[in-house]
Amino acid sequence: MMSPPSAEPPAPSTSSAGPPDDWTFRVDALTKRFATLAANDSITLRVEPGEVYGPLGPNGAGKSTLVKQTIGLLKPTSGRITLGRFDLVADPDAARQLCSYLPQVQMPIDSFHVVEAIELAGRIRGASARDVRGRTASLIDSLDLGEWKDALGHTLSGGVKRLVGFCMAIVRPGRLVILDEPTNDVDPLRRRLLWEEVRALGAHGCAVLLVTHNVLEAEKSVDRLAVIHKGRLVAEGTPSSMKAADRSQLRLQLMLTPGTATPALSPWAGPAVRVGHNLVTAIAEADASTAISWAAELTSAGVAEEYALGAMTLEDAYIRLTSHMSGDGDDDGDA
Amino acid sequence: MMPELQNASVIVPHGTVERGAKRWWHDYAVMVRWHLSSLRVWLVTLTIVQLLAGVGFVLGISLFFVHVPMTAALFVSTGVPVINLMTVGLILGPQLVADQKSNGSYEYLRSMPVSRSVTAAAWYTVCLIGGVPAMIVSLGVARLRYDLPLHVSPMIVPAVLLTSFAGTMLGYALGHAIGSPMATRLITQLLVFAIFGFAPILVPLSQMPRWLGTLNWWFPFRHMAVVTRAALTPGGHAAVLSAYVVLGLWAIACAGLAGRALGRRP
Ligand SMILES: Nc1ncnc2c1ncn2[C@@H]1O[C@H](COP(=O)(O)OP(=O)(O)OP(=O)(O)O)[C@@H](O)[C@H]1O
Ligand SMILES: [Mg+2]
């Protein structure tokens, strides 16, 4: 949780003047073409204040293209992007003031001290010097960055640099906070701290657009997910609703012995995906004991080194939706 | 209402979009600090370039002569300030932007909630901060070494402001309006070469072939030297007015190009 001065619960999205403002983020039939490629193809979505919304999708799916149009770095070919009563496409000044943004790429902080970079980012976003000092100290503390607070940007490791960029984006968050792969290069413990800060943003009434490849971790931190594939939004819902289709299924995973061919699957198994030496398939709960003896046989025959049977994960749902495999081992968010 | 509101304001900004003069000046002050900090790793390079240009050139000419002719000393000593003024804006500036474009951090800069005029004005201020002290040091050294008949007129103020502005905006356009960072670096390096060797800043116009002099008329560097020299030396000066006009036009055109490139959404 966050430490003072930001520990108190906020009064979200009520402004002292006039009626309570509407700060819903809406994307309507958004299309962006690069020459003939439709990087975004008629995407429609909405994110309520306080909601953490996570677009997922394979490389090149169009996630960054979506967020860049929101912040005004790219112009949509057609469609609308609004935040409350503000049209972000027609008014990029408003977009930049109302949204805070962590780009997927590097931050320009090589010559900055860590604290200085975060504080200046907050000042540029209009916060007072006093507020920004308190908030920066609390972020440094809650993300465990104290060791580096006076270091120069170009001396930082990749993960720490990423976390500093994250702090710069949320030191004074906008009504919409856009985070394009904030956990890249960040160690597992600090990733957990980062997810807590993301949750806190939601609790404080920000709408959060969180792009990530960390499917399993995202599951615990986002309210809703969207799967984007080849520029189209192919599925949307809460993490549990996304897994609903797989509910009566189990996940059977075989770690094949290097150099062996993919074994023929029995009729009770679903379609299998092989990446490297990993073979994953879905089976019905009723077939569990059959599957275990089959897998055990393969293991003792030396075809597989080991096997695992478990509940379907969000990653499986994601793979089913995008027919992609995200290379098991290198996605270190495995439960 | 409740005491929490004060803290909540840190977390969630008010849902208003500010565009007034007050916001402009606030952003300007913060962006000056931002730009100054972004030069921190260049500080050593900057100091070396300024010293080389200033003290190096001023004292360097004495290596060529047994007795340095006063005209030569005066010419170089009044040309070096132009180099000092252009170092940050025209030479370092475009490289900085090219680096930001290459490493991707340009994207964050473009997403900052400040207007283009704020960023440009703050950068110009920083270029003055990086140039004027060096210029004063160079002139001081020249004066001590050669006992020059310098005559600083009040016109030094517009001359310095405009010379630095034109150089800064040219650098700004090179950085922002040229798509490829490689091309930016290449052109900037060529410019440095041209400024030192082929512009009548350190080399008198009379020593140049006629065509080079004519060519120089279309570029801003010759005019920078004319306005700066006119404000530093006694007597009437020809072509000062036209020099101001040409410099002004260059500055406006470059600022426009850079501004357009910065506002472009592909
Ligand atoms: N400026 C551009 N010009 C041409 N094509 C582009 C441009 N930017 C992106 N694309 C293309 O648009 C598609 C979507 O790219 P985008 O960066 O949005 O993907 P992404 O979902 O963010 O992928 P990743 O997970 O790798 O970051 C890709 O095929 C990419 O090659
Ligand atoms: Mg991306």
Image (cartoon, coloured by chain):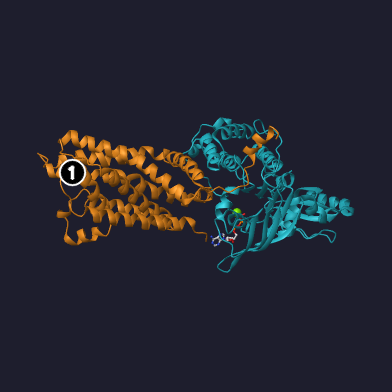
Chain colours: A cyan, B orange
Let me know if residue A286 appears in the view: yes
Q: Give the residue at x 45% y 50%.
A: B117
The residue carrying pointer 1 sits among few (fewer than 14), some (14 to 19) or many (20 or more) residues within 10 Å by Cα, namely some
Q: Give the residue at x 19% y 62%.
A: B211
Which residue is more in the foreground, A216 or B237?
B237
Query: Secondary structure beneath disc 1?
Result: loop
How many numbered marks have been drawn onto this rendered protein structure?
A: 1
Judging from the image, mark 1 belongs to the subunit labelled B
Q: Give the residue at x 23% y 35%.
A: B140
Outermost residue on the right side: it is A286
Outermost residue on the front side: it is A18
Q: Is residue A260 left or right of residue B123?
A: right
Q: Is residue A157 left or right of residue A288?
A: left
Which residue is more in the foreground, B49 or B235?
B235
Task: Classify the position of ligand 1 by quadrant: top left, top right, bottom left or bottom right.
Answer: bottom right
Q: What x and y, as percent, mark residue B166?
A: 33, 51
Q: What x and y, as percent, mark residue A170?
A: 61, 41
Q: What x and y, as percent, mark residue B136?
A: 27, 37
Outermost residue on the bottom side: it is A36
Q: What x and y, as percent, mark residue A132?
A: 57, 35
Q: Quadrant of residue A266?
A: bottom right
Let me know if residue A99 appears in the view: no
Residue identifier under label 1: B233
The disc labelled 1 sits on which kind of residue? Answer: Thr
Quadrant (top left, top right, bottom left, bottom right) of the N terminus of chain B: top right
Does the beta carbon at disc 1 come under 8 Å from ligand 1? no
